[in-house]
Image: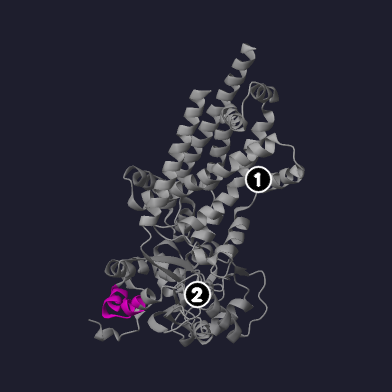
Amino acid sequence: MNLKMKKISLVLIVAIMFFSVLTFSQQIKAEDRLVLATTTSTENSGLLAELLPPFEDKYDVRVDVVSVGTGQAINLGENGDADIILVHARDAEDEFVKEGYGVNRRDVMYNDFVILGPENDPAGIKGLDKAAKAFEKIASSESEFVSRGDNSGTHMKELSIWNEAGVKERDSWYLEVGQGMGASLNIANEQNAYILADRGTFLAYQGDIDLNVLVEGDEVLFNPYGIIPVNPEIHPHVNYQMAMSLVGYITSHQGQSIINNFKVTGEQLFHPSAIEVDKIK
Amino acid sequence: MDYIFDALIEAIEMIIAFDKELVSVVSNSLKLSITSTIIASLIGIPFGIFIGRNKFWGRHFINSVLNTLLSLPTVVVGIFVYSLISRRGVLGEYDLLFSFWGIVFGQVLLILPITTALTRNTVYELEDRMIKTAISIGANRWQCFILILSEIRYGIIGAIVTAFGRVIGEVGIAMMLGGNIKGVTRTITTAMALETHKGRFSFGMALGLILLFLSFLLNFIIYYLQIGEKNNGQQKRNNT
């Protein structure tokens, strides 16, 4: 009995010791932390893995990247669950600032959206110069189309193009998958379906999928990214100082040049827009 | 078909080479699961013994609730805790969302019913005679508690291992409350979900193999304990 008690208390002590060491080690690591809510396109393409480490070293801060759709990223900002957001949906961004949730929005970079589809192109949209016209043809031929369906920047853009094309009824050929850009691309690839994607993610996935760029270059397909710190007057707890430092860094010569030089399989994914490209040092 | 084998070979190479990213993800998962399991055990085991030993008003209700919670879906816990620890939630000021302790919070809620109910079940099987004898020769409450603990130790370890197995393999809570932040809250399961989306099968596969190995290990322990219990029971019968 006594021996058993000793054994059990030994186990308990070891458990508690382990537990407190764990707690302690967690606390040591609690340096300055910045929560960046951003879109799947910036994270999945690998850009942030290049862009953020120099910033983290310079300012001795840990940037925690939560990659979700633009809609959810904005929502995280509104709730004060993120310190800063990097998103691409200009109208929603302006709304976010107008309602007072965000301050000091800056342009960061841009790329463009492309309409991808299978080689045989059942809707016959290859080479069209208007995105809305292409969507109309996809709808009238009832070819399968994969939609992000997650209220992301890409999804919002897609909806506005459907709107422009005047297509209101979308039934069984229209697949709302509710997932990130990469996952949706894989699904479209497996289903031989059409999809609207940002060029950055498409280039990053190009080697693994058989979809081709069928429509590009239309003005409505322009895709600018903005960075917005969360307003400290609404959410006093946010790390506003560090958020502004990140804005400064990303729009600096160093940050812009990293964006400009970021290439996947030899192709440039994003174009810096805070500083004119030929003036970046 | 080839790419599966290629990915599998690359996965094994990664495991052997102790790939840095792989190690970070696996150690995150282990730290989280061990912490959650310890907390849930420290609360659940005494609670389970209490419910199993005492006849109190409302225990049938508590038992029904406990049994229901045994199969609690992870996403339900996820969304419930999310609403609590978001900045707009009641516990918003503690900065738990997208952090280690945020996930622990959710996971403890998930497995607390498991440690409690499984402990309670083994207490039910315990022979009352022994406790009565102990009391009759002057054991106090604390000594009774220790006696029960040592008598049901196999059941308790079984409960702990089951709870651990549940958290290490769950993805809903880690994803919703952790946010899949690289190097911080990225776990085996959330990394697997992400890497599959990114088309990096070999990395996901390596994690899958590790997870499979862990669950094999756990099941082996449970099996071993069951045998131990059986032998133990037989011995007792032989002694009487």
Crowding near the residue tagged with mark 1, few <14, some 14–19, many ≥20 C-alpha atoms within 10 Å? some
Marked residue chain, label 2: A
Report the front residue among B11 and B150. Answer: B150
The residues bearing labels 1 and 2 have C-alpha atoms spaced at a distance of: 35 Å
Report the front residue among A32 and A96. Answer: A32
**Residue at disc 1, secondary structure:** loop
**Residue at disc 2, secondary structure:** helix
Residue A159 location, x and y as percent? 58, 79
Crowding near the residue tagged with mark 2, few <14, some 14–19, many ≥20 C-alpha atoms within 10 Å? many
> Looking at the rendering, which quadrant does residue B58 occupy?
top right
Residue B147 location, x and y as percent? 59, 27
| Residue A265 in view, yes or no | no
Are discs 1 and 2 both within one chain? no
Q: Quadrant of the C terminus of chain B?
A: top right
Report the front residue among B202 and A118. Answer: B202
Q: Residue under label 1, please give it.
A: B70
Residue beneath the point at 39% across and 75% down: A243
> Looking at the rendering, which quadrant does residue B123 occupy?
top right
Q: Is residue B240 left or right of residue B175?
A: right
Marked residue chain, label 1: B
Residue beneath the point at 54% across and 73% down: A79
Q: What span is colored magenta in the figure?
A: A245-261
Q: Is residue B23 left or right of residue B159?
A: left
Q: What secondary structure is the stretch in magenta mostly built from?
A: helix
Q: Residue under label 2, please give it.
A: A77
Q: Amino acid at mark 1?
A: Leu
Residue B154 location, x and y as percent? 56, 29
Q: Amino acid at mark 2?
A: Gly
Residue A214 location, x and y as percent? 47, 76
